[in-house]
Amino acid sequence: MRVQFGDITLDSASRQLARDGAAIHVSPKAFDLLCHLVEMRPTAVSKNQLFELVWPGTFVVEGNLTVLITELRRALGDDPHTPRFIRTVHKHGYAFCGEVTEIAPRPAARDALRVWLLWNDRVLPLAEGENLIGRDPSCAVWLDQPGVSRRHARVMVTDDTAEIEDLGSMNGTFVSETAIAGRHQLRDSDVIQVGSVDLKYRSWSPSNPVATERIRRAK
């Protein structure tokens, strides 16, 4: 989803929020909340639905949601009393009330990086933008295995790089047996440990192809 409202653009695939081209920084949970409200516009989304989206399977108090809404309003320059973007629906939840314009998708880059994960005999392609890894069936990389959290980690793919980030999982995310903190840039043949699963990261780029090995056959 790439949309514009007012002087703000939102790109859910690359997880970018900007005002007149300048990045607006919000927490990952606030970003997810904004995307959901925009996607559901103009429908009023209940607090229970938002709890399940942002904190799946976890009990949290209502104040946590209020904190995220306040963060978004501050980042967007929105006034709760005269809202341009986020409207409070009393005793129910919230709704996105701004006028939204869809932005045409970016043309595919001819020399875009192609990346995938290997898991045993399975090949798991990764798309440009965000690729969630976890036990939730909605994840791009679905791993229904012990020790894997519902939303365990994500891999962000751009034209020339891929970075992995742990999402506060119970057992952490490791690259080559080292726990990662923040975003970690992946390199071809890195081994990613997610719970009990080992994933091998592979990449290919037209600008940096792997040479074909010559096979010597016995005479």
Image: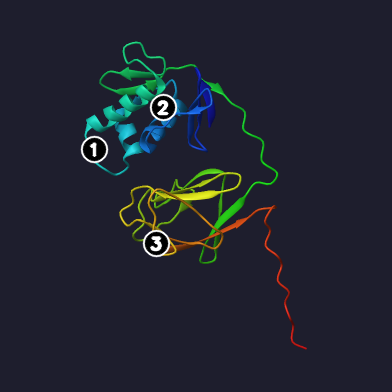
- Judge the density around disc 2: few (<14), some (14-19), many (≥20) Cα neighbours within 10 Å: many
Residue extending furthest top?
82
Q: Which residue is mark 1?
A: 60
Residue extending furthest front?
22
Q: Can you give x and y, in whole percent of width and height, for residue 212 in the image?
A: 71, 67
Tell me the amino acid under the disc marked 1.
Val
Asked if residue 51 is positioned above or below residue 97 in the image, the reply reads below
Q: Where's the C terminus, which quadrant? A: bottom right
Asked if residue 85 is positioned above or below residue 23 in the image, the reply reads above
Q: Which residue is mark 3?
A: 178
- Judge the density around disc 3: few (<14), some (14-19), many (≥20) Cα neighbours within 10 Å: few
Tell me the amino acid under the disc marked 2.
Leu
Q: Please, what secondary structure does the residue beneath circle 2 have?
A: helix
Q: Quadrant of residue 144?
A: bottom left
Q: Which residue is mark 2?
A: 37
Write the residue at 41% across / 18% down: 85
